[in-house]
Amino acid sequence: MNLRIQLLFCDLRNRKIDILPEFYQSMILSWQNICENVDIEVNSENVFDIPLFLNPNITKCNKMLYLKIFIEARVCKIKDIAYECKPGFLKESYIQEIVSEKFPEVSENKMIDAVRNVLETIPDEYKVLVEANVHVSKTPVLNPMIKDGVQICSLPSTTSFFFLYQMLVSKLSREPKSVSRWRLMYTDFDLRKVQKIMNFPFLQSDCREIAFKFFHRIIFTKERLFKCQITKDSLCPICSTLPDSLNHLII
């Protein structure tokens, strides 16, 4: 569709972007997951750059338009169906001719219905701007927002990108149950201290993994295995005198 910043205004579903490289699919789907929490403030709008299809603001019976033949014929934005040198939209026959040149096999009746469907679905406020021939540069400003409408930060900044990443992670993942359990048991304990200890830069990856397992008590010692009735006893296999517990492993 040859969209740039206008991509932010589209609602792209997975089946529409599966032909793109995986990196771009991931970026677009990530945006789709957080866009409902991001307010797009448009200081001045160029109506001619607004996409016609997969645009939540251009709908019919609460459904967004999606006409593949128009997209492949490069009729994707409002400017593609409007005059360049005078106000107003192109005649239906002109738009039909543009698309039919790419798809001559489509029947005339179906093409006319599709053209009228597009023209009738465009909101009245957009039509007024097109008829007035208002060409204004558009400068979208993305403002990450939380649900109650309080602004957190503005783009671009290091803080805002970190906030958007946190927003995405919160939507795609869930906090481990062990974290909430530790918070409940030790309400005054600062869990961030443990995070700093586990992620010291000098620690090797296997050491970090052991530290994480130790903190969350997911190391299967003989003491735990004995409780699960998997071993015959809970004694340490080295000293054979004390239970093989976490404390015994470390001390």
Image (cartoon, rainbow, N blue to C red):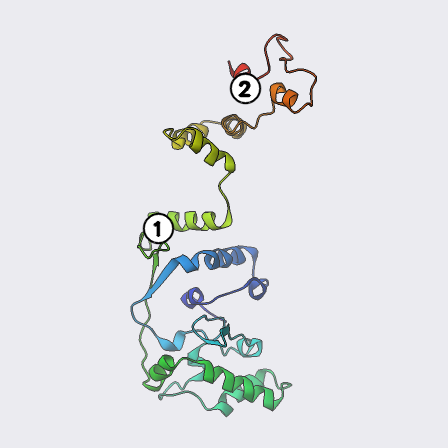
Badge 2: residue crowd in 10 Å (few <14, some 14–19, many ≥20): some
Does dot 1 land on a helix, a strand or a loop?
Answer: helix
Residue drawn at the location 57% of the way across and 86% of the way down = 111
User: Is residue 26 shown above or below 204?
Assistant: below
Give the camera-side residue of 248 and 177.
Answer: 177
Q: Position of residue 235 (x, y in %)?
A: 63, 13
The quadrant holding residue 151 is: bottom left
Badge 1: residue crowd in 10 Å (few <14, some 14–19, many ≥20): some
Q: Position of residue 137 (x, y in %)?
A: 32, 72
How many angstroms separate mark 2 from mark 1 (CA)? 41 Å
Does dot 2 land on a helix, a strand or a loop?
Answer: helix
Give the camera-side residue of 236 and 119.
Answer: 236
Instruction: Residue type at mark 2: give it.
Output: Leu
Q: Which residue is mark 1?
A: 160
Q: Position of residue 202 (x, y in %)?
A: 45, 27
Q: Which residue is mark 2?
A: 246
Task: Please tell me the numbered disc located at residue 168.
Answer: none
